[in-house]
Amino acid sequence: MKKTIIATAMAVLMAATPIFAAETLKVPETNYQYIRIYSDGSRQTEYLSMKVENQDGKLEKNQRIELKNCAALLTINGSLALQNDMREVDGTMYIPLRTMAELLHGSVTWNAQDQSVIFRQGSQSLIFVVDSRICMWNGKEIKMAKPMISIDKTTYLPVRALAELTGHEIVYYPKDAPENIWNYPQIALSKYPKGTEKITPEQAANIAEEKWISGLAELEKYEGKTSSAKYEERFHIDFTQTPIENDRYYLFAGENSTMNLMVDKYTGTVYKYHKDRTFLFQPEVDEVNAMLWSA
């Protein structure tokens, strides 16, 4: 019966959708310069906060979500998603299909009568039926490891299933993994154009060290040599060591574990992580204030 539903939905979709073609993707910028995880006054509730761009591409005020029931953080191409509705069910991480569709710039059509769902992303399509492991991906029948399920009248899909079907690499980082700076489990999805080149660890070390030295020099101008020397001693980073690496960043950890410099593998942008927050490393603009404030 469920195969019949899928076949019927597929026939309708094929009549309205062009033949599938590969999507062209660009390496996106990331949002790591405006992220913070913090507790409320009672320290019983934690929040994820970040600045979000409006339609004109300008950064708006911070938006936040409560992390009380968050099963894992989610990053897509290096950017942290502002969502907290993933659930772990029998060892499998699920996410609302509509949430995932929005994050992947897709759309969802729901048919309550036959419990089928059509996910579209550009010229690609995916058809599911609740509680079935059978789906149709671009006209081809696929058997998933876990079925789509319904929780509180919301349709959830295994994160790995949709990620792999849409061509994303997926990596899971436990909260205590050295390549995971956040104190939460993290699922990282990534999909970049073929042939996209990354900078090498050696290049990343040179970029990060140059920024670090510039920051100390700016600090010395305003606070004197003693202050910059104390800062360097407290947060010393050995740029000769091989950096920790995750899906998007090279991480250079200071001797004080709360301090990290992160270099974007694709853009060379340097971020600084300290006291559960991230921001751009800009010595020539605001690094003096940032260093003093974060110390």
Image (cartoon, helix red, strand yellow):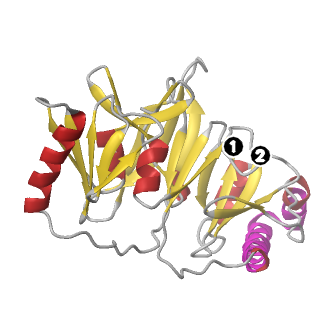
Q: In the rendering, which numbered label is found on residue 38?
A: none
The alpha-carbon separation of the residues under discs 2 and 1 comes to 6 Å
**Amino acid residing under circle 1:** Lys
Q: Foreground: 81 or 22?
A: 22
Q: Foreground: 79 or 99?
A: 99
Find disc 2 in the rendering and name its residue: 258
Q: Quadrant of residue 223?
A: bottom right
Q: Residue at x 79, y 68 (%)?
A: 216
Q: Foreground: 10 or 249?
A: 10
Q: Residue at x 41, y 48 (%)?
A: 162
Which stretch appears magenta? 203-230
- On screen, residue 183 versus residue 221, left or right, reads left
Locate residue 2, reporting x and y percent. Answer: 23, 34
**Amino acid residing under circle 2:** Thr
Q: Residues within 10 Å of mark 2 (few under 14, many from 20)?
A: some
Locate residue 272, reporting x and y percent. Answer: 67, 58
> Relative to 141, is 150 above or below?
above
Q: Does the magenta portion include 235?
A: no
Q: Residues within 10 Å of mark 1 (few under 14, many from 20)?
A: some
Q: Earlier in the sequence, mark 2 or mark 1?
A: 2
SS type, badge 1: loop
Locate residue 230, reporting x and y percent. Answer: 89, 57
Circles 2 and 1: CB atoms closer than 8 Å: yes
Q: Residue at x 63, y 36 (%)?
A: 184
Q: In the rendering, which numbered label is found on residue 275?
A: 1
SS type, badge 2: loop
Locate residue 136, reporting x and y percent. Answer: 29, 50
